[in-house]
Image (cartoon, rainbow, N blue to C red):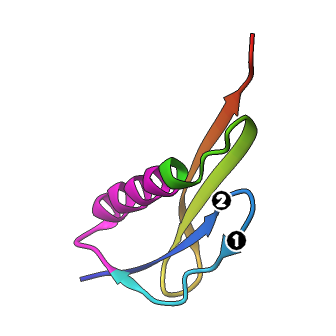
């Protein structure tokens, strides 16, 4: 199975995937990183203001394959 690396930036911390994750194909990796990003955002959302969450999938050669960005904005009206 192909190997992929996830680089995550949650607006406060940035981590470069050090360990490869196996997925059946690029679509499975895409679903995996989108799910991971949503889970991180759910755990880290601020009480107000804004925050941007970003994830990138890399292949073993270091090439960026896919990017997902989730932007959270909130304000009192």
Q: Is residue 18 above or below residue 34?
A: below
Q: Percent from the top left, x then y, of residue 52?
A: 69, 47
Position of residue 69 relative to residue 18, above or below, is: above
Q: CA distance from mark 2 to mark 1?
A: 6 Å
Q: Nearer the viewer, residue 42 or 16?
A: 42
Badge 1 crowding class, 10 Å Cα cut-off, few under 14, some 14 to 19, many 20 or more, is few
Q: Which residue is mark 1?
A: 14
Q: Which residues are magenta?
A: 22-40
Q: Position of residue 20 (x, y in %)?
A: 42, 86
Residue 28 falls left or right of residue 74: left
**Disc 2, SS:** loop
Residue 24 located within the stretch drawn in magenta:
yes
Give the quarter of the figure containing the N terminus: bottom left
Q: Position of residue 17 (x, y in %)?
A: 55, 81
| Residue 63 point in image, percent of width and height | 58, 76
Secondary structure mostly taken by the magenta-highlighted segment of the chain: helix
Q: Residue at x 71, y 44 (%)?
A: 51
Asked if residue 67 lies in the magenta stretch, the reply is no
Which quarter shows the C terminus? top right
Depth check: give the residue in front, 52 or 44.
Answer: 44
- When the figure is inspected, residue 28 is found, relative to residue 16, above or below; the finding is above
For image coordinates 74% across by 17% down, the residue present is 76
| 74 w.r.t. 20: above or below | above
- Disc 2, disc 1: CB below 8 Å? yes
Mark 2 closeness class: few <14, some 14–19, many ≥20 residues within 10 Å:
many
> In front here: 77 or 35?
77
Viewer-proximal residue, 59 or 37?
Answer: 37
Q: Which residue is mark 2?
A: 10
């Amino acid at each position: 199975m192909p190997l992929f690396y996830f680089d995550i930036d949650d607006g406060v911390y940035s981590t470069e995937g050090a360990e490869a994750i196996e997925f059946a194909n690029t679509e499975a990796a895409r679903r995996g990183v989108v799910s991971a990003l949503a889970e991180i955002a759910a755990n880290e959302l601020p009480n107000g203001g804004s925050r941007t969450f970003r994830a990138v999938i890399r292949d073993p050669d270091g090439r960026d394959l896919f990017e997902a960005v989730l932007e959270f904005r909130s304000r009192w009206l």
